[in-house]
Image (cartoon, rainbow, N blue to C red):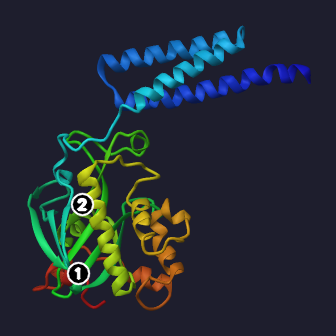
Amino acid sequence: MSRFFHILPHVLFSFITLAGAAWSATALWLNTDGAMRTFALALLVALTLGALRVQFHKRRLGWALLAITALAVLGWYQTITPRADRHWAPDVAHGVTARVSGDQVTLSNLRDFEWQDRTTATQAWVSQTYDLTQLDSVDMFTSVWGNPDIAHLLVSFGFADGEQVAFSVEIRREADEVFSELGGFFRQFELVLIGAKERDIVKLRADHRGEDVRMFPVDLSPEHRRQMFMSYVALAQDLEAEPQFYNTISANCTTVVYGLARNLQSDLPIDSSLILSGRLPQYLENLGVLGGEGSLQDRYDAALLPAGAEALHPGLSYSQAIRAGR
């Protein structure tokens, strides 16, 4: 037993050191390159091995070396700050901005691309003014491309004149970047709020990317619809004033919207659906705000958008076509 208690501190030290080294190596790999990456990783290996070796002979010195290494890594990590001036990928080149004058909200940098395929589009960024007294619907879109438990979330607001504007919280990739869930944990991507026409952002996913896109009406009172819309406006203004990082768990398309929704109901329950976003319809059903008729499964089945909706309903706009017969 005495031998166990003699070894235990060394085991704990080794575990903490190796776990910290793994986290640090990942952060360095993702946020440095070239000679700096090589030097930083070599220094980390040397300090880690040094701490492990020293601790077996001089325990306090080992802990001191580990603490110094940890403080150095964390100090460097805090220098990684979000920016708004990078060379962005075209589809996230602009985040939506908002100006409010009474009941009138003017949204600028609204994306209105005409996509030819999943990567090629005729680009257009437009401005439009919306009258909040005419706001009369909210729809949630979930877009699944693989695992049905994981979905991208969009929220679309409809107005009495037939106009729709959709909001999507996304990673802001640089022109040469590819999304990585791992990178999303380590400050590799900024956060962007895209405001877009449904004929751009929904059609891209349903028609060109071949994703399973579902549209669910959300039953909110006029007051709550307005508050939800203004929550997105506030987020747009916050991101315009100060960029933020995307995070795979804590600041993604679902958790950010959850934070906005708490403005409507401060005691919203935390649920696994905030991570397993494909289950959001069940979450809304439990809250009593999922619209439609029939069982949850009936509404889930009916929510699937067809590819080529405009061809199925000639003469209708895209937003009208995906709602025809619903």
What crowding class fits label 1: few (fewer than 14 Cα within 10 Å), some (14-19), or many (20 or more)? some
Q: Decide which of 124, 100 is in the foreground and name it.
A: 100
Q: Residue 120: horizontal and vertical position, in percent?
A: 13, 55
User: Please, what is the three-letter code of the amino acid marked with disc 2?
Assistant: Ile
Q: Residue at x 36, y 21 (%)?
A: 37
- Indicate the secondary structure of the residue bearing disc 1: helix
In the image as oriented, which residue stretches furthest toward the front?
Answer: 102
Where does the image place residue 204, in percent across and percent down from the top left? 22, 64
Q: Nearer the viewer, residue 292 or 51?
A: 51
Q: Which mark is residue 132?
A: 1
For the N terminus, which image quadrant?
Answer: top right
Above or below residue 137? Residue 53 is above
Earlier residue among tags 2 and 1? 1
Residue 134, by quadrant, is bottom left
Residue 60 x %, y %: 69, 14
Disc 2 or disc 1, which is closer to the eye? 1
Regarding mark 2 in the picture, which secondary structure is present there? strand
